[in-house]
Amino acid sequence: MKRLDRALPSARVVHRHAWIWEPLESEPGFVLRAMFGAKAVYLDGKIVLCCSTGEEPWCGVLVPTDRAHHDALRAEFPALVVHSVLGKWLYLPESADAFERTATALVGLIRRRDPRIGVVPKSKKRRATASVRGTRSVRTRSRRHSS
């Protein structure tokens, strides 16, 4: 008997916060990446949102910003709190009464390129490799010739 489930296309799992970043998808410079089980939204090379559906304090929207902007953003959006683990970023818990309204307003600020939201990620340092274009490291040569 043939298995029918192999012929069927697999269902695509939709992130429950996808509605938050969807208005940004048509923006030039939009990039969506997986980050530690969350979805990180980049715009013009800056990380501007991180949507997470894990356990608290990772269930909601993280707002990458400099500490200098915390007070102004929290005054405008009282549902934002300083993230308990990543204190440099603000956090909009999914459990907040104003979650949808605040997330929508934040996306509006991001579309207008509000300078308070977003940080340029630190560049990744490349690890030194043992071989460089065909040359072997000293350790490799010494092991190879020690027999």
Image: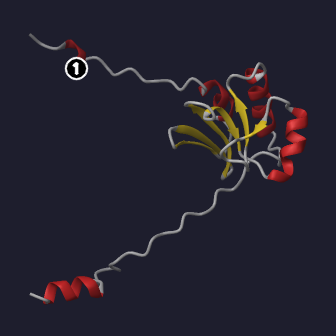
- Binning the other alpha carbons within 10 Å of mark 1 as few (below 14), some (14 to 19) or many (20 upward) gives few
The residue closer to the viewer here, 62 or 39, is: 62
Residue shown at the point (14%, 89%) measured from the top left: 145
As drawn, 69 above or below 60: below
Q: Is residue 51 left or right of residue 91?
A: left
Give the position of the N terminus as an image quadrant: top left
**Residue 59 sits in quarter:** top right
- Whether 102 is drawn above or below 89: the answer is above
Residue displayed at 74% across by 23% down: 96
Occupied quadrant, residue 2? top left
Name the amino acid, label 1: Arg
Q: Residue at x 63, y 61 (%)?
A: 122
Q: Position of residue 66 (x, y in %)?
A: 79, 52
Residue 120 in the image: x percent, y percent?
A: 69, 56
Residue assigned mark 1: 6
Frontmost residue, 67 versus 5: 67
Judging from the image, what secondary structure is the residue with disc 1 in? Answer: helix
Residue 127 versus residue 108 in the image, above or below:
below
Task: Please give left or right for residue 20 compared with residue 145 in the image.
Answer: right
Instruction: Determine whether, in the image, residue 40 is placed left or right of residue 72.
Output: left
